[in-house]
Image (cartoon, rainbow, N blue to C red):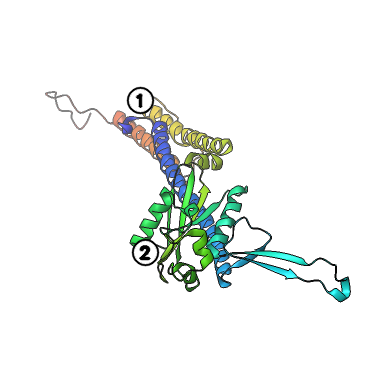
Amino acid sequence: MINNRSITTQFTIVFVVALLLVVGSFFLVLDSVYRTELKSQAETVADNVDAFGTWVSQYGRVWVRDNDKSFLGQVTLVNAPDAAGTGASAPADVWHFYSKNPALAQREFSEVVEKSNSSAKFRVTSHNYMNPVNKPDAFEVRALDRIRANHLAEYYETTPDNFRFARTLYVKASCLPCHASAENAPADVKTRYGTERGFGFREGEVAGIISVRLPARSFWKVATDVVGPLQIALLVSGFLVAVLFIQFAVVRPIKRVTRAAERISVGQQADLGAAGLSRSSANEMHQLILATERLRASLGLAMQRLIRKPAPPAPGGPPRSSTE
């Protein structure tokens, strides 16, 4: 049993158990803080993407010049030169503008981020996606199902390598011209995406999600970044200081009192080291030594009185006269 072991051994066991509990609590708190930080970063990314989409939707579409890689509609503007100022033979300026709706602008924005060095990646997807490129992956399908079934504003998961976050997008009035019905959708939208998917939305219902992906380090990687050789050395040093204190302040005085008590029990002289100790000391070990010293002194006085006490008369002997 642990009660039969030395004080140093008992202290070591208690210290190790307490240390394990503290370390376990620390790592649980560290893991919670790390996940909260990841979620906060993902929310910031989603906020920025949502704000960008809201900005585009304010104007219905945005127009870019001289970039026909991806667009819905197009328009050509011709700026004729001033014949009086530059001459009739001066060439006209021809500008080609191409339009992008909020969904297309956000997708192209996500493609730029995907190719960048940014650790945060995002995309906008939906259960009723219009563009096949925006088809949801396995996590996004789960997120959409949970969000629609439980009316969630967000959903997230942690995998060994990534933190996945989904922010719910709701259908706004500005979305309806393109997504309410295929019949009323702009011709360029139907020309680019067809009429099979991406329609039938109503204002206020779930339109899709902003899906954010962040790299997630393993729990032990985070822990080793926080706890290094210096911290371990300080912990071991603290343990050694505590053990030495127990040895010098508790174990050695107890052993000294024990040896003295054994000598006293067989009638030998023993030095408890009580000289110089104050009776008003708050140190429990000092009080034990002083109490043992008083016990030794009391036992010595009792033995002296017992030795000086006259022996009783032998039984059957003649009584002594008063004149003797």
Identify which amino acid the numbered label 1 is placed on.
Gly
Is 259 placed left or right of 44 in the picture?
left
> In front here: 93 or 14?
93
Q: How many marks?
A: 2
Q: Which SS class for mark 1? A: loop
In space, the residues marked 1 and 2 are separated at their CA atoms by 87 Å
> In front here: 93 or 261?
93
Establish if 147 lies above or below 261: below
Establish if 32 lies above or below 306: below
Which quadrant of the rendered structure holds the N terminus?
A: top left
Q: Which mark is residue 151?
A: 2
- Nearer to us of marks 1 and 2 is 2
Q: What residue appears at the point 87 percent right and 71 percent down from the top-left corner?
A: 86
> Quick one: label 1 or label 2, which is nearer the N terminus?
2
Residue 90, image x, y percentages: 84, 67
- Residue 272 in view: no
Q: What residue appears at the point 77 percent right and 66 percent down from the top-left corner?
A: 93
Identify which amino acid the numbered label 2 is placed on.
His
Q: Which SS class for mark 2? A: loop
Q: What residue appears at the point 42 percent right and 34 percent down from the top-left corner?
A: 12
Residue 126, image x, y percentages: 44, 58
Q: Which mark is residue 213?
A: none
Name the image quarter holding residue 129.
bottom left
Q: On the image, numbered disc 1 is attached to which residue?
A: 267
Is 242 placed left or right of 138 in the picture?
right
